[in-house]
Amino acid sequence: MPNIALDQIETLTRAALERHGAAPWIAAEVARAVRKAEAVGNKICGLYYLESYCAQLRTGRVRGDAEPVVTRPRPGAVMVDAKYGFAQPAFARGLPEALAAARECGVASLAVGHAHTCTSLGFFTEQIAAEGLIALGMTNASPIVAPPGGKTRVIGTNPIAFSVPDGKGGIAMQFDQSTTTVALGKITMAKAAGEKIPEGWAVDADGNPTTDPEAALGGSLVSMGGYKGWGFGLMAEILAAGMTGGVVSRDVKPLKSPEGPPHDLGQYYLLMDPSVSGDFRDRLNQVAAGVALDDGARMPGQSKREVDPVPLEDAVWAQLRALAGQG
């Protein structure tokens, strides 16, 4: 298993995307997100998606030349039409206007619509927090979750991310998690590896608990905390689709399929200026101090560290090089 420098991962990812039809600036934004995911061990949101990105560029399921359109219909509302392109460049185009709106109004929203899957929401909320603003983000995905007590898939894993600035250009806390017990990628990775999954992750098509990833993929993932997680998933669904013009989860086709209609997903962010209250920093410090009273306890995200170089499985490294034209 080779150890590969992040710079090399980013460079080859960019080359692969350009080779399959992405404009250079768009490939650069997506490659930056892949690099970050690999750096923190978030394999599901990193090179795991690259092959499908490239295939979908070739088939036109994602537009590699899409120029996002940014508008500001209200003083505190910024909207980006991704034009069926990648979410990363659409967010990059809308972020400066959203930051300005939040600083002017105290609170602002950034709605990215008609976009490809964004993979890691924390990648985006962290950028907002790095600018000194509090960030809350959410999105929806292909349907894989039935209501508690039901069997029909209604929503996706519908992740939520929250990032808080530390006032020094860093992150005081951050979480980025699906509203299901686990992300869908962990099920598909278990299936590919021929492994069982823990009970409690999913139910089969009849609503019975299962440890078989194949049965799980034919059934439904379980919302974290039962009906409580289901409520958060619905919140993400309504805001991600309703406030961006993206489709509801039931109309999202499998995200990694090479062909089919565009993902047409929405990502919805709230940006909040902590200086509005005048007390935010003090209260944050008080909460952090309380968390630190017990040895080993820490604010979410504080244990996450970037690694460079990172170990890649031989097959992943070979695939990356082949997609970039170096295989």
Image (tube, rainbow, N blue to C red):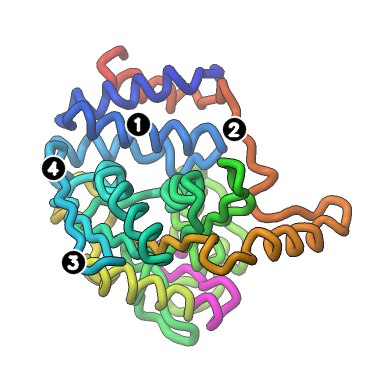
Q: Identify the magenta region.
A: 215-230
Residue type, label 4: Ala
Q: Residues within 10 Å of mark 1 (few under 14, many from 20)?
A: many
Residue type, label 3: Pro
| Quadrant in which the C terminus is drawn | top left
Return the residue at label 3: 73
Return the residue at label 2: 306
Residue 31, numbered circle: 1
Q: How far, Cα to Cα, is label 2 from label 1?
A: 16 Å
Q: Is residue 22 visible from the viewing direction of this image?
A: yes
Instruction: Identify the secondary structure beneath mark 4.
Output: loop
Q: Nearer the viewer, mark 4 or mark 3?
A: 3
Residue 66, numbered circle: 4
Q: How far, Cα to Cα, is label 4 from label 2?
A: 31 Å
Q: Does residue 326 sit above or below 100 in this rendering?
A: above
Q: Is residue 256 visible from the viewing direction of this image?
A: no
Query: What residue appears at the point 17 percent right and 58 percent down from the top-left corner?
Result: 71
Residue type, label 1: Ala
* Circle 2/circle 1 CB separation < 8 Å: no
Residue nearest the observer in this picture, 174 or 251: 174
Q: Does residue 169 sit above or below 141 in this rendering?
A: above
Q: How far, Cα to Cα, is label 1 from label 4?
A: 16 Å
Query: What residue appears at the point 51 percent right and 73 percent down from the top-left corner?
Result: 223
* Circle 4/circle 2 CB separation < 8 Å: no
40 displayed left or right of 117: right
* Circle 4/circle 3 CB separation < 8 Å: no
Instruction: Identify the secondary structure beneath mark 2.
Output: loop
